[in-house]
Amino acid sequence: MSYFEKLYRNGELLGRAKLVYLYLHDRCDAEQKAWPGIKRMAADLSLSRSTVKRAIRDLEKAGLIRKEPHCRENGGTTSNRYFLID
């Protein structure tokens, strides 16, 4: 069975969510963690920022990713961390 079989066979996920998942998978480190910004993902995938945000919510709801907010040392916010769930 392919690594992505669960993604391909999930009839409830829209194409936008599948595309964002593949994007995150492509950018993961050894810990299955990726941290691209919404603006970067939208530009790279030719999607709107709101479409990327909806896709991330869909992936979280489906239990395929976990999103964690991330802050800089000075307290400012930076890109979220996205963890792929096997």
Image: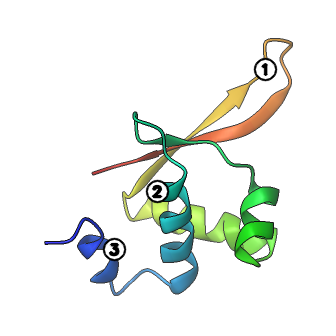
- Name the kind of residue labelled 1 in the image: Arg
Q: What element carries label 3?
A: helix
Quarter of the view holding residue 4: bottom left
Query: Residue tagged by mark 2?
Result: 25
Comparing labels 2 and 3, the label whose residue is closer to the camera: 2
Q: Kindly identify the residue that appears in the image at 81 percent across and 30 percent down.
A: 77
Which circle, 1 or 2, is nearer the viewer?
Answer: 2
Q: Which of marks 1 and 2 is nearer the N terminus?
A: 2
Residue matched to label 1: 72
Amino acid at dot 3:
Leu
Amino acid at the residue labelled 2: His
The alpha-carbon separation of the residues under discs 2 and 3 comes to 12 Å
Q: Residue 14 location in percent, x, y?
A: 50, 84
Q: Marks 2 and 3: CB-CB under 8 Å?
A: no
Please name the colour scheme applied to the rendered image: rainbow
Question: Measured from the top left, where is residue 32 in percent x and y?
Answer: 41, 41
